[in-house]
């Protein structure tokens, strides 16, 4: 990861997770910090699998404009695809992807990164950008490391 902002941000998230009292506080810290540090991350949020319905994602803490997509079936959206495929999904141009569920007309690209606890997906980090092709290999590595920190916190 060439961008020093990624390393610094990861280290701050590690530090916060070591003392955070609960998951919601850690998630809110993460979305606010990431959105502040990375200006092309225009919407940053968590979707977590419903503990009563493993086929539905539920909106968690987020930073950005409010969204109508509060519950997303895993069969729908880029968010659902990341769970169904069990891997990070990057969409360079959301207008060209029929799976895309619109959250803001300004969104041009999106990345969704699964969070795992003991190898099971429990949720994901979702980022939208107003730029086309905003997310590359460094963003993916950075966000997958964020997801590992959140998963480790949940496992405690
Ligand atoms: N675009 C997502 C929906 C969530 S909003 O981006 C906040 C999707 O296609 O699943």
Image: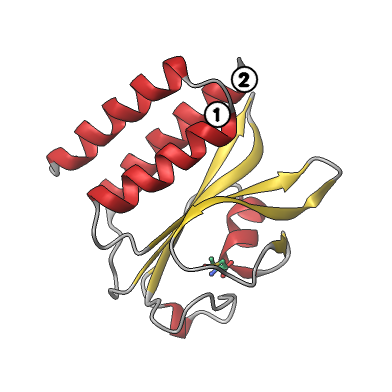
Residue bearing mark 2? 155
The answer to whether residue 110 is seen in the rendering is: yes
Q: How is the image coloured?
A: secondary structure
**In front here: 17 or 88?**
17
> From this viewpoint, which residue is outermost toward the right?
52
Q: Is residue 22 above or below residue 34?
A: above
Q: Determine whether label 1 and label 2 are within 8 Å by CB.
A: yes
The answer to whether residue 126 is seen in the rendering is: no
Distance from label 1 to label 2 (Cα)?
Answer: 6 Å
Label 1, residues with CA under 10 Å away: few <14, some 14-19, many ≥20: many
Picture quadrant of ligand 1: bottom right
Q: Is residue 66 left or right of residue 137?
A: right
Secondary element at tag 1:
helix
Q: What percent of the width, then of the height, locates residue 153? A: 54, 22
> What count of labels does the image hold?
2
Quadrant of residue 12 within the rendered picture: top left
Quadrant of residue 67 within the rendered picture: bottom right
Secondary element at tag 2:
helix
Label 2, residues with CA under 10 Å away: few <14, some 14-19, many ≥20: few
Q: What percent of the width, then of the height, locates residue 9? A: 26, 35
Label placed on residue 62: none
Q: Is residue 116 above or below residue 135?
A: above
**In front here: 119 or 9?**
9
Residue at image coords 42%, 47% = 31
Residue at image coords 64%, 23% = 118
Residue at image coords 59%, 60% = 79
Q: What percent of the width, then of the height, locates residue 111? A: 43, 59
Quadrant of residue 56 within the rendered picture: bottom right
Residue at image coords 65%, 60% = 80
| Image quadrant occupied by the N terminus | top left
Ligand 1 is within 8 Å of the C-beta of the residue at disc 1? no
Residue bearing mark 1? 151
């Amino acid at each position: 990861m060439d961008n020093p902002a990624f390393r610094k941000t990861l280290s701050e998230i590690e530090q916060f997770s070591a003392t955070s009292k609960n998951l919601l506080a850690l998630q809110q810290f993460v979305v606010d910090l990431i959105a502040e540090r990375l200006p092309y991350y225009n919407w940053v949020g968590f979707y977590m699998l419903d503990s009563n319905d493993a086929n539905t994602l539920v909106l968690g803490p987020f930073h950005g404009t409010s969204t109508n997509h509060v519950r997303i079936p895993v069969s729908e959206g880029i968010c659902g695809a990341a769970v169904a495929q069990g891997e990070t999904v990057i969409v360079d141009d959301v207008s060209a992807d029929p799976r895309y569920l619109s959250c803001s007309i300004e969104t041009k690209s999106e990345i969704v990164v699964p969070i795992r606890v003991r190898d099971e997906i429990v949720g994901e980090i979702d980022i939208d950008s107003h730029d086309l092709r905003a997310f590359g290999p460094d963003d993916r590595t950075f966000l997958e490391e964020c997801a590992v920190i959140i998963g480790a916190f949940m496992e405690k």
